[in-house]
Amino acid sequence: MKAAVLHKAGDALAIEDAPTPGAGPGEILIKVRACGVCHTDLHLISGQWNLPKLPVILGHEVVGEVVEVGRGVGNFKPGDRAGVPWIYSTCGACEFCASDREPLCPSIVVTGFMVDGGYAEYLKAAASHSLQVPKELSWLDAAPLFCAGLTPYRALKISGAKVGETVAIWGIGGLGHYAVQIAKAMGTRVVAVDVAAAKLELAKKLGAEVTVNASETKPDEAIRDFGGAHVVVCLAPAAEAILQGFAALRRGGTLVLVGLPKGNFTLPILGTLAKGIRILTSGVGTRQDLREVLALAVQGKIKTVAEPCRLEELNDVFDAMRQGKIAGRRVVTFS
Ligand code: NAD
Ligand code: ZN
Ligand code: ZN
């Protein structure tokens, strides 16, 4: 099969022939129809984290048609539409799996990182952690929901944001364009912060009440000027966004960290305590969160803004992403 293979951190992806996998017990084989391009893949290609498997096929927003079903699989049959997220599998038995926190499972296996992902014509997946893709959603619209939709959904869900409260979102890229819509659907007032004017225009169209260009204005001051944010969700792959987001919070506010810039951050202890700030982190989400995101999309409450690209164009797509030039999501599609 044709695949985009990462041989070494720092290299471009090689578009080459790779062995087509088969479905073992408990597994399904998917003919990939679409795979969204997540900024996390750019972090992986850049060598920001150690890569446990090399060579590896990246890609963790995968949807396609089931073509083979392994022994013991009861939830899929050939011809079904399946989707595969970042979480390839978990143990199902630990305290985290048993308590709505499966992303924390110590035995987690990650798609497109620890096992091969969806930048390929075929993907083998665990049936237990794959989901049915509703027929109302096109392949292009469905694929990015599996990470870019899921992740801000979970982050906003755990943030505790209430109707009428102000939610400020830093980084209106793939994740952010859904975050704006999800926060709006929750009945909050949405402030969108980015460094690119085109992203802020998109945020306005998708329901942001206020937009702030952090390359022109100090975003924390702008947000404090109208009362501060009850919740800040940091999706930007930029460390300064965390400090700015923190400074934009109201007393009792909640900072949710999602974006994965390199390095560390420092926050003032007294300022954090005196203002009663809660600091949370959020990583992807559970299968149940994903079902809820898919339902929101079927109801038309969140829409995917995406452009298709070919597997051969992936390296150019990552260049464009590095330069912050992609609005919404770019999605590799296969005919
Ligand atoms: P993206 O490239 O599509 O979007 C990033 C956006 O951030 C762009 O619009 C860019 O202009 C904006 N930005 C850059 N610097 C900024 C700054 N200083 N202030 C405000 N905005 C800024 O990326 P994405 O796919 O949406 O991913 C965003 C981040 O989230 C990445 O770091 C990714 O690895 C991470 N991520 C985390 C999880 C998780 O589970 N925690 C899941 C998926 C992605
Ligand atoms: Zn992702
Ligand atoms: Zn577990």
Image: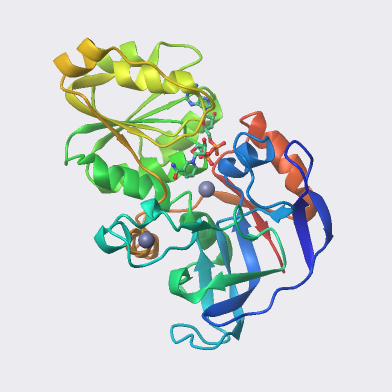
Question: In which quadrant of the rendered view does residue 241 lie?
Answer: top left
Left or right, 274 with respect to 212, comes to left
In the rendering, at what x and y percent does residue 285 appear?
Answer: 38, 53
Residue 58 vs 236, above or below: the answer is below
Q: Which of these two is toward me, 321 or 120? A: 120
Q: Residue at x 38, y 17 (%)?
A: 243
Q: Residue at x 41, y 37 (%)?
A: 258
Render colour scheme: rainbow
Check the image and name the residue furthest to the right.
Answer: 16
In the rendering, at what x and y percent does residue 334 appear?
Answer: 71, 65
Q: Is residue 133 visible?
A: no
Residue 192 vs 301, above or below: the answer is above
Left or right, 220 with respect to 41, comes to left
Q: Residue at x 22, y 44 (%)?
A: 187
In the rendering, at what x and y percent does residue 156 appear?
Answer: 30, 43
Q: Residue at x 48, y 12 (%)?
A: 216
